[in-house]
Image (cartoon, helix red, strand yellow):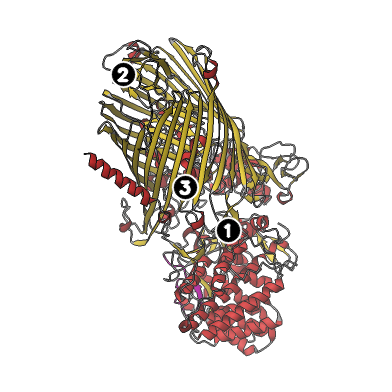
C-alpha cells in the first residue's frame, strides 16, 4: 500500500455510558456512536450501553433513526451518558445502504427520508404507494383500486417523453426489477411482493448530488429502500395483527334506475322519431318492470382487509440478524378482485474476523393476485355498472344467473351479465420473487475497505385466466383458458473500494471507487386452449382445441465504473464530486457508453456563527449540479430488423420492422438544485427548502412518421424539456411535554415545459406536444355549454372564448390545461398524551385536469342511451326553451357530435384527501410491563374523506398519469383495527 | 484462512475485469433478425408477412369489407354495438378511427411490399421463383393503392386528388403530397401489368388459393379495370376476365353447395383467391362473422328492400336468417370464432365482370348470356335470354352482397348513395360527384405530421 497516514494518537482512553430517550427515559439500543471525523464507531447494546476508545478532545457523535443527532466532546470523565430527542423532521442519519459500506446520501444531497414507523401496518399493498404525502417532490398515481395494482411514481415531474419515466428502485444497495410484468392481468407490480413492515427507511433521491452515482437510470430520481437489520442485544420480538374492511374512497357517478332510463330513452326516441315512441321502453324493452342496479350487483357484501406480521431481531458483537414473516390480504369492493402476500426475510451479518464481515440478505415474497377486465372489455364490472340496462335481471326466478336467450346468451343490448362472469371466470397471477444479496466486506486497513456484493433477483409470474363456456367471451369457443409464465432474472455484481482519510483534524476525505455490472434476462411462455366441457377444470391441456403456444426471450446488460470523492471541513463545509461511466446494450456499438457526473457543496452557516443551541442549530445551504442519463428504450430501437410471428396458411412470415436509428444515444438530464436545511430552537422547528431546475436534453423521442412510410414512429434524440419547481418541508414539535403535537407539511411545486422539439404541435389523442407548454397538455375543443334556446351543444369557435358554434368541426382545438398536478403534498399531524396517540395525514394535489374517457358513451345526450344507459347526470338535460342544463337536448341516435372530445368531460382534479387517521392506545405507557416494551391497540382509517373542488367530477380524482379515466376500479377507503406488540 | 481470502479477492478482481468488456454489452436478439434478404425463402416469408398484415381487422380482416358493404343500398347499421357508426351514418370527422386505422394499415402493407419489389437479392438458379414473388407483390400493391384510391381519393366527389404514391421502403422524414387521381390510376395499372407479366414469366401459373397467382392476378385486374370505367379499361377488364374464364379448373359452385362454400377454407372450386385466416390467427370478436351475425354484435344488417328483391327460389336468399323479426346475413362469414378465410375473388364474379364489360362494349351478347347463366342457373333461377346490363348488375349485387363490393360498384356507375338510420329506414341520399362525405377524411394524425398532404374537404 502506498498511502501512509500520519495520525497522531493522543492519549487514548475508554469511555462508556448509557444512551436513553428523552421522551420516555428508556434505553436506546442500536445507537451509532462515532468518533467525529473518523470511521471509528460502535453501537449501543440492548440496554443502551456503549464503550469506545477515544482521546480527550475528540468529539463523540450519537445518532439514531429519527432522533436528533447529538455531539459530546470527550473531557476528563470516562462516563458519558446521553439523552436523545426524537426528531420528526430528521433527514439525516437514517440507515441507508449504498455502495459497499458507504452511504450514497451525502450532506449535499437533496433527499427525503420516510422512516419505518410512518409506513408500518398501513393497509396498502405496494411500497411505493406509501410515499404519498410523506416526501416532497414525489407524485404517486395508483390509478386503480385494484389491490396490488401497479402505481406510477414521478419524482420532480416527468423528465422524458418516450424513454422510461419511472424512478430507479434500489433495495439494500442493489438496483432491482420494478414495474408490471403481468400479461394476463390488468395491473400488477413486482414491488408489491415486498412487505412494507420489513422496511427501515425509504429515501427519495432527487438532485444530481444524490443520483449521479446511479448514472444512467437515475434521470427520473432514485428510491432507496433499506430493509431492517438486527442490532446487537437480546432478541427483540415484534408482532402485529390487523383486520378491517374496504369501501370505495369515492362513490363515483351513479347509474340510472329503470324508471330514469325509461324516461330518458322515451324522450330521446320521441325527439328523434316522433310521439309514437312514447312509453316505448316500458312497453317494449322492459314489460316485466325489472329494475336492476348493476352497480350493486358487481360489488361484494364486505371487502376484507387483514395483515399479520412477526419479526425477531438481535445479535451479538459478531452476529446480527433480522428475520420476519408477514401476511397481507386485501379484497377490492368488486368481487373476484383481491391481493394477498406471504413474505419472509432473513438478514444476517457475521464478523468473520476483525477485518472481514460477510452478510446474507434473503427475501421471499409470494403474492396472489386476482384482477378484472378493464377499460372497454364487456367483462369489466365498472363498464357493466354504466353500460348494462337496468331492464335486464341479474338472476332468474330460480336463483340462477340470467344469461339471455339460449343459442345467443347475451343481455338485451348484446352485453354480458358481469356478476355471472365474476363468479365463473378469473384472471389470476401468482408471483414468487426471490432475492438474495451476498455481501463481503474486507477492511484492508482501518480506513480502506473493499466490498463486494452479488445480488440475484428472480421473479416468476404464473398467470391463469379462464372464461366459462356458458356465457361471455368464453361462449363461442365453448370455454377458454390461458396459462402464461413469465420469468425475469436480474443479477447485479458490485465491487467497491472505499478509503477514508483526514488531513489535519478538520479536513475529512472519503474516496469511493466502484465497478458494477448488471444483466437482465426475460423470458416467457404462453399457452391457451378452448373447448371446456366439464366445469371446474381450467388446465390448458383439458381443452379440446389447443390454440397454441408462444414464447419470447430478451436480455440486456449494463456496466459501469464510478468514482466519487467526499470532502468535509469540520462538518461545516461539504464538497462532493461523482463521476460515472456507464455502458448500455440498448444502443448501437459507437453510442453505448455515456459519462455522468455531479458536483455539489454545502455550508452550514450556523456552525460558523456559533449560535446558542436554543436559537439556531443548523442553517445549511446546498447547491448541486450534474448530468445523469436515461436509456430506457427497447433493445431494438437502434436496429433495423425483420421480425417473426404467426403463420400464413402454414407458411412462416417475416415482417419489416424496426425503424432504425443507429445514431440514437443517451438522453441527458441536468439537474441544478439549491437547497437550505435548517433547525431552530433546539431543533423544535426543522425544515428544508429546495429550488430546482432539471433540464432534459437529447430527448429520446418517438417521432411520429408520416403513416405513408408504413411505420408510425421512430426514436430520435430531439428536443429538450425542463422541470422546475420548489419543495418545502417543515416540521415542528409544537408541544413537547406530556402532551405532544408534532406537525409536518410537505409541499411541492413542479412545472413542466417543453422547451424545444424537432417537430412542433404533435397531437396524439387528447394531448399536444407544443413548445412552451407542459408535455401533459390537453388539446381539444372547448365546450360552451348547452344553448338554452334549442338545447344544441355549443363549442367556442376559437377554442377559448367568445363566439360559439353548434357545429363541432367548426370549433378549433386549443390547449386546455394539463394532466399532472403542479402542486402536491401532505400535511401530517401527530398527537400523543400518555398512552394515547393520534396520527393524521392529509394529502392534496392541485392544478391538474382529469378527462372522463368513457363519457362519450355514457353522457351522450341520447346517442347511446337506448343501448347503454350511462350516468345518472344524463337526467340534467335540456327539455324546453329557457332550460339551463348540463346536457344537450336528448335525441336518440343524434349525430350532432355533442359527445365528441371536448372540455365538456374535462374536470379539475384538485382535491384534498384525508389519507390516514390512526387512533392508538399504548397500554405499557400506563401499565408498565417488564415483558412488553409496547402494546399498541389502534383504529385506522385510510382515505376516509376525499374533497374535490369540481362539483361535476364524480370519478375519483386520482387517476392514471395520462389523466384519462378508463373505467378503473375505484381507489379504496379502509377501516382497520389492529394490535401491535413488541417485547 | 488468510489464503482463502486472497484467492477470493483475486477471483473477484478477475471477474470485475472480465465482466465489463464491450462484449458484455452485446446481447443476442431472440426474435428479430437484421433487415437483410438472404434467400428466396426470406422473400417468400416477407410476402406471407404482407398477407398477414392484410388480414388485419383494420384492412381485409373486417373493416375494408364492411366499408364496401355498409355503404350502398344493401346494408345498414343498427348501431347495436356502436361499431361502424361513422361509415354508416356519413358523419366522420378528421380524427375518425376507421379512417385512420385503415390508412395506416394499407401503407404498412405497401411498405412491406416495397421491400420485396425493390429487393436486389439474386439467385440465378431460382430466378423464376423470385419473379413469381415479385409479381405477387406488384399485384398486391396495385390492389392496395386501389383501396386507398377508393377510400381517400376524390374520384367520386368532384375532386382531382388521389393518394401519396410510395414506391420504396423508406422510414426517413418523408412528407409526401398526394398524387392526382389520374396518376394513382396510372400507378395501379402499371403495377397490375408488371405483376401479371412477371407471374407469367415465372412459368408457375397456378398455386395455392391463398397466394396470388397468374389467374387470380388477372381476376383482380379485371375487377379493377371494370372499376376504372374508361372504354380502354373496360376492354382490358373483358380481356383479363377471359384469361381466368379460360382456366377450366374454376367452376361455379352449385346451388346445393352454395351456402356451404362459404364455410370452406381454400378448397371450394369457385374460389380463385382467399386470404387465409385459420384457427391460430382467428379474428374472434373482431371478425366479420361477429359484426354480421346476431350471435355476435350483429350491427351490419341487410336492407329490407334488398332482402325482398330475391326470388323465393334463389338459393342466395337462404344466406339471410331471421331473429326477432330482424334479418342478418349469417352464412357468408359463418364461423363465430372468425377463422374463415376471407373470400376475395370468386369465379362467379369474374363471369359477371366479363358479362358487364361485354355488354358495355357490345362485344358478344350470346357470350354475355352464357356467362350470366352459368351463375344464375346454379342459384335456382331460370336462364336469361338477351340479358341486359341492368340485369347483370342486379345479379352482381345479389351474388356479392356483404362481400365488400356493393358500394364501389355503385360509385363506379355514378349512382347516388342512400343512407339508412338504425331502424333501416332511408333517411338521406348522398349525391354522386358532389357530396364530400362519400369518401373518408385524410386522417388528422397524418395532416398533423405531414404538412404536404392535402386534406379532403368536408371533415
Left/right of residue A470 with respect to residue A947 in the rendered view:
left
Task: Return the x and y of residue B127 as percentages of the image width and height.
Answer: 49, 82
**Picture layout, residue A786 above or below residue B341:** above
Q: From the image, tell me which residue sits under label 1.
A: A712
Tag 3, which chain? A
Q: What stretch is highlighted in magenta?
A: B263-279
Distance Cα–Cα, label 2 vs label 1 = 67 Å
Q: From the image, tell me which residue sits under label 2.
A: A50
Q: From the image, tell me which residue sits under label 3.
A: A582
Q: Where is residue A121, by image quadrant?
A: top left
Q: In which quarter of the image is the C terminus of chain A?
A: top left
Residue B147 visible to an observer of this rendering? yes
Left/right of residue A84 with respect to residue A137 in the rendered view:
left
Q: Does the magenta stretch include residue B273?
A: yes
Q: Is tag 3's residue or tag 2's residue first in the polypeptide sequence?
A: 2
Tag 2, which chain? A
Residue B384 visible to an observer of this rendering? no
Q: Residue at x 52, y 60 (%)?
A: A658
The answer to whether marks 2 and 1 sit on the same chain is yes
B149 or B123: nearer the viewer: B123
Task: Look at discs 1 and 3 and give the one toward the viewer.
Answer: 3
Q: Quadrant of the N terminus of chain A?
A: top left
Amino acid at each position: 500500500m502506498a498511502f501512509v497516514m500520519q495520525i497522531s494518537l493522543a492519549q487514548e482512553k475508554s469511555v462508556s455510558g448509557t444512551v436513553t430517550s428523552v421522551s420516555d427515559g428508556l434505553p436506546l439500543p442500536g445507537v451509532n456512536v462515532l468518533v467525529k471525523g473518523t470511521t471509528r464507531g460502535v453501537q449501543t447494546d440492548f440496554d443502551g450501553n456503549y464503550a469506545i476508545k477515544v482521546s480527550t478532545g475528540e468529539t463523540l457523535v450519537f445518532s439514531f433513526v429519527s432522533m436528533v443527532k447529538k455531539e459530546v466532546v470527550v473531557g476528563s470523565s470516562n462516563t458519558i451518558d446521553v439523552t436523545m430527542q426524537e426528531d420528526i423532521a430528521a433527514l439525516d442519519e437514517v440507515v441507508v445502504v449504498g455502495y459497499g459500506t458507504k452511504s450514497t446520501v451525502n450532506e449535499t444531497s437533496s433527499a427525503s427520508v420516510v422512516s419505518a414507523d410512518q409506513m408500518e401496518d398501513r393497509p396498502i399493498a405496494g411500497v411505493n404507494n406509501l410515499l404519498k404525502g410523506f416526501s416532497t417532490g414525489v407524485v404517486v398515481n395508483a390509478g386503480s383500486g385494484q389491490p396490488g395494482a401497479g402505481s406510477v411514481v414521478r419524482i420532480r415531474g416527468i423528465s422524458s417523453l418516450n424513454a422510461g419515466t419511472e424512478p430507479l428502485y434500489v433495495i439494500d444497495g442493489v438496483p432491482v426489477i420494478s414495474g408490471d410484468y403481468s400479461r394476463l392481468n390488468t395491473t400488477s407490480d413486482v414491488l408489491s411482493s415486498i412487505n412494507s413492515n420489513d422496511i427501515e427507511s425509504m429515501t427519495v433521491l432527487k438532485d444530481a448530488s444524490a443520483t449521479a452515482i446511479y448514472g444512467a437510470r437515475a434521470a427520473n430520481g432514485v428510491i432507496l429502500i433499506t430493509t431492517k437489520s438486527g442490532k446487537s442485544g437480546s432478541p427483540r420480538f415484534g408482532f402485529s395483527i390487523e383486520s378491517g374492511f374496504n369501501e370505495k374512497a369515492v362513490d363515483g357517478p351513479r347509474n340510472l334506475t329503470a324508471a330514469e332510463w325509461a324516461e330518458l330513452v322515451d324522450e330521446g326516441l320521441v325527439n328523434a322519431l316522433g310521439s309514437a315512441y312514447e312509453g316505448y321502453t316500458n312497453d317494449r324493452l322492459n314489460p316485466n318492470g325489472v329494475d336492476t342496479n348493476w352497480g350493486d350487483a358487481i360489488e361484494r357484501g364486505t371487502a376484507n382487509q387483514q395483515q399479520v406480521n412477526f419479526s425477531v431481531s438481535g445479535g451479538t458483537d459478531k452476529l446480527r440478524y433480522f428475520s420476519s414473516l408477514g401476511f397481507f390480504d386485501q379484497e377490492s369492493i368488486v368481487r373476484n378482485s383481491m391481493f394477498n402476500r406471504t413474505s419472509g426475510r432473513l438478514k444476517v451479518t457475521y464478523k468473520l474476523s476483525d477485518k472481514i464481515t460477510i452478510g446474507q440478505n434473503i427475501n421471499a415474497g409470494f403474492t396472489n393476485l386476482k384482477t378484472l377486465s378493464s377499460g372497454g372489455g364487456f367483462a369489466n364490472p365498472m363498464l357493466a355498472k354504466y353500460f348494462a340496462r337496468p331492464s335486464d335481471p341479474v338472476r332468474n326466478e330460480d336463483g340462477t344467473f340470467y344469461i339471455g336467450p339460449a343459442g345467443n346468451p347475451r343481455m338485451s343490448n348484446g352485453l354480458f351479465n358481469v356478476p355471472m362472469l365474476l363468479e365463473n371466470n378469473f384472471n389470476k397471477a401468482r408471483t414468487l420473487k426471490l432475492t438474495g444479496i451476498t455481501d463481503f466486506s474486507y477492511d484492508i486497513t482501518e480506513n480502506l475497505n473493499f466490498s463486494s456484493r452479488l445480488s440475484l433477483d428472480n421473479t416468476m409470474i404464473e398467470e391463469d385466466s379462464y372464461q366459462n363456456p356458458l356465457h361471455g367471451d368464453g361462449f363461442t369457443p365453448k370455454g377458454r383458458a390461458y396459462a402464461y409464465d413469465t420469468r425475469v432474472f436480474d443479477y447485479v455484481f458490485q465491487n467497491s473500494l472505499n478509503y477514508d482519510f483526514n488531513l489535519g483534524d478538520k479536513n475529512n476525505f472519503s474516496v469511493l471507487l466502484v465497478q458494477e455490472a448488471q444483466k437482465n434476462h426475460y423470458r416467457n411462455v404462453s399457452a391457451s386452449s378452448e373447448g371446456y366441457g366439464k366445469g371446474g377444470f381450467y388446465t390448458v391441456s383439458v381443452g379440446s382445441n389447443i390454440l397454441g403456444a408462444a414464447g419470447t426471450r430478451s436480455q440486456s446488460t449494463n456496466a459501469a465504473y464510478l468514482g466519487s470523492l467526499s470532502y468535509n471541513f469540520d462538518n461545516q463545509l461539504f464538497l462532493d464530486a461523482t463521476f460515472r461511466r456507464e455502458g448500455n446494450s440498448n444502443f448501437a456499438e459507437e453510442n453505448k457508453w455515456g459519462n455522468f457526473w455531479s458536483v455539489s457543496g454545502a455550508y452550514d452557516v450556523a456552525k460558523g456563527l456559533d449560535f446558542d443551541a436554543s436559537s439556531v442549530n443548523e442553517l445549511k445551504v446546498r447547491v448541486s449540479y450534474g448530468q445523469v442519463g436515461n436509456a430506457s428504450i427497447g433493445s431494438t430501437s437502434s436496429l433495423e430488423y425483420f421480425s417473426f410471428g404467426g403463420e400464413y396458411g402454414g407458411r412462416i412470415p417475416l415482417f419489416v420492422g424496426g425503424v432504425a436509428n443507429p445514431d440514437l444515444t443517451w438522453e441527458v438530464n441536468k439537474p441544478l438544485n439549491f437547497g437550505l436545511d435548517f433547525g431552530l430552537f433546539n431543533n423544535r422547528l426543522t425544515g428544508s427548502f429546495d429550488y430546482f431546475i432539471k433540464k432534459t436534453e437529447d430527448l429520446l423521442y418517438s417521432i411520429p412518421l408520416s403513416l405513408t412510410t408504413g411505420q408510425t414512429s421512430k426514436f430520435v434524440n430531439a428536443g429538450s424539456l425542463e422541470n422546475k419547481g420548489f419543495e418545502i418541508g417543515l416540521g415542528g414539535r409544537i408541544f413537547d411535554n406530556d402532551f405532544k403535537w408534532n406537525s409536518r407539511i410537505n409541499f411541492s411545486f413542479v412545472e413542466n415545459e417543453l422547451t424545444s422539439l424537432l417537430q412542433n404541435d404533435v397531437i396524439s389523442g387528447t394531448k399536444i406536444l407544443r413548445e412552451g407548454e407542459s408535455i401533459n397538455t390537453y388539446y381539444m375543443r372547448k365546450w360552451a355549454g348547452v344553448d338554452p334556446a334549442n338545447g344544441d351543444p355549443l363549442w367556442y369557435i376559437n377554442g377559448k372564448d367568445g363566439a360559439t358554434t353548434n357545429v363541432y368541426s367548426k370549433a378549433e382545438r386549443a390547449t386546455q390545461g394539463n394532466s399532472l398536478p403542479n402542486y402536491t403534498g401532505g400535511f401530517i399531524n401527530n398527537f400523543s398524551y400518555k398512552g394515547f396517540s393520534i396520527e393524521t395525514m392529509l394529502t392534496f394535489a392541485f392544478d391538474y385536469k382529469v378527462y372522463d374517457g368513457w363519457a362519450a358513451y355514457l353522457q351522450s345526450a341520447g346517442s347511446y342511451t337506448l343501448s347503454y344507459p350511462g350516468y345518472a347526470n344524463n337526467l340534467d338535460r335540456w327539455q324546453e326553451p329557457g332550460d339551463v342544463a348540463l346536457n344537450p337536448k336528448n335525441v336518440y341516435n343524434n349525430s350532432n357530435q355533442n359527445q365528441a372530445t371536448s372540455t365538456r368531460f374535462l374536470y379539475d382534479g384538485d382535491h384534498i384527501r384525508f389519507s390516514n387517521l390512526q387512533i392508538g392506545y399504548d397500554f405499557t405507557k400506563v401499565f408498565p410491563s417488564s415483558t412488553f416494551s409496547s402494546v399498541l391497540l389502534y383504529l385506522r382509517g385510510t382515505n376516509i374523506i376525499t374533497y374535490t373542488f369540481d362539483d361535476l367530477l364524480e370519478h375519483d380524482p386520482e387517476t392514471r398519469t395520462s389523466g384519462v379515466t378508463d373505467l378503473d376500479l375505484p381507489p379504496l377507503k379502509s377501516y382497520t383495527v389492529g394490535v401491535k406488540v413488541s417485547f | 484462512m488468510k489464503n482463502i481470502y486472497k484467492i477470493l479477492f483475486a477471483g473477484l478482481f478477475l471477474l470485475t475485469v472480465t465482466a465489463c468488456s464491450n462484449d458484455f454489452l452485446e446481447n443476442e436478439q431472440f426474435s428479430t433478425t437484421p433487415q437483410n434478404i438472404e434467400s428466396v425463402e426470406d422473400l417468400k416469408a416477407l410476402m406471407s408477412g404482407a398477407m398477414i398484415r392484410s388480414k388485419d381487422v383494420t384492412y381485409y380482416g373486417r373493416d375494408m369489407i364492411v366499408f364496401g358493404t355498409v355503404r350502398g343500398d344493401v346494408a345498414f347499421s343498427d348501431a347495436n354495438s356502436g361499431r361502424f357508426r361513422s361509415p354508416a351514418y356519413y358523419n366522420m370527422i378528421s380524427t375518425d378511427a376507421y379512417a385512420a386505422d385503415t390508412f395506416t394499415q394499407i401503407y404498412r402493407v405497401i411498405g412491406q411490399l416495397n421491400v420485396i419489389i425493390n429487393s436486389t437479392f439474386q439467385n440465378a438458379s431460382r430466378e423464376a421463383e423470385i419473379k413469381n414473388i415479385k409479381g405477387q407483390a406488384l399485384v398486391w400493391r396495385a390492389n392496395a393503392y386501389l383501396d386507398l384510391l377508393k377510400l381517400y381519393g376524390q374520384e367520386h366527389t368532384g375532386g382531382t386528388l388521389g393518394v401519396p404514391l410510395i414506391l420504396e421502403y423508406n422510414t426517413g422524414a418523408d412528407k409526401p403530397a398526394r398524387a392526382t387521381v389520374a396518376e394513382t390510376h396510372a400507378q395501379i395499372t402499371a403495377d397490375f401489368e408488371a405483376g401479371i407479366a412477371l407471374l407469367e414469366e415465372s412459368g408457375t401459373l397456378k398455386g395455392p388459393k391463398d397466394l396470388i397467382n397468374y389467374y387470380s392476378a388477372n381476376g383482380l385486374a379485371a375487377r379493377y379495370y371494370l372499376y376504372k370505367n374508361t372504354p380502354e379499361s373496360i376492354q382490358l377488364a373483358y380481356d383479363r376476365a377471359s384469361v381466368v374464364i379460360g382456366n377450366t379448373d374454376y367452376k361455379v359452385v352449385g346451388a346445393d353447395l352454395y351456402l356451404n362454400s362459404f364455410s370452406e377454407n381454400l378448397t371450394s372450386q369457385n374460389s380463385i383467391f382467399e386470404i387465409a385466416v385459420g384457427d391460430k390467427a382467428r379474428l374472434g370478436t373482431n371478425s366479420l362473422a361477429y359484426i354480421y351475425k346476431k350471435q355476435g354484435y350483429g350491427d351490419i344488417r341487410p336492407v329490407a328492400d334488398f332482402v325482398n328483391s330475391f326470388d323465393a327460389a334463389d338459393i342466395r336468399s337462404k344466406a339471410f336468417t331471421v331473429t326477432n323479426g330482424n334479418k342478418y346475413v349469417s352464412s357468408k362469414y359463418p364461423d363465430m370464432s372468425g377463422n374463415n378465410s376471407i373470400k376475395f375473388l370468386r369465379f362467379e364474379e369474374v363471369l359477371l365482370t366479363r358479362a358487364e364489360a361485354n355488354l358495355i362494349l357490345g362485344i358478344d351478347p350470346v357470350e354475355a348470356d352464357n356467362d350470366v347463366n352459368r351463375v344464375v342457373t346454379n342459384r335456382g333461377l331460370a336462364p336469361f335470354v338477351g340479358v341486359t346490363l341492368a340485369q347483370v348488375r342486379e345479379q352482381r349485387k345479389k351474388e356479392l352482397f356483404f362481400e365488400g363490393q356493393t358500394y364501389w360498384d355503385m360509385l363506379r356507375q355514378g349512382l347516388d348513395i342512400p343512407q339508412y338510420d338504425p331502424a333501416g329506414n332511408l333517411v338521406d341520399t348522398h349525391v354522386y360527384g358532389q357530396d364530400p362525405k362519400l369518401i373518408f377524411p385524410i386522417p388528422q394524425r397524418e395532416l398533423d405530421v405531414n404538412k404536404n398532404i392535402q386534406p379532403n374537404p368536408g371533415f
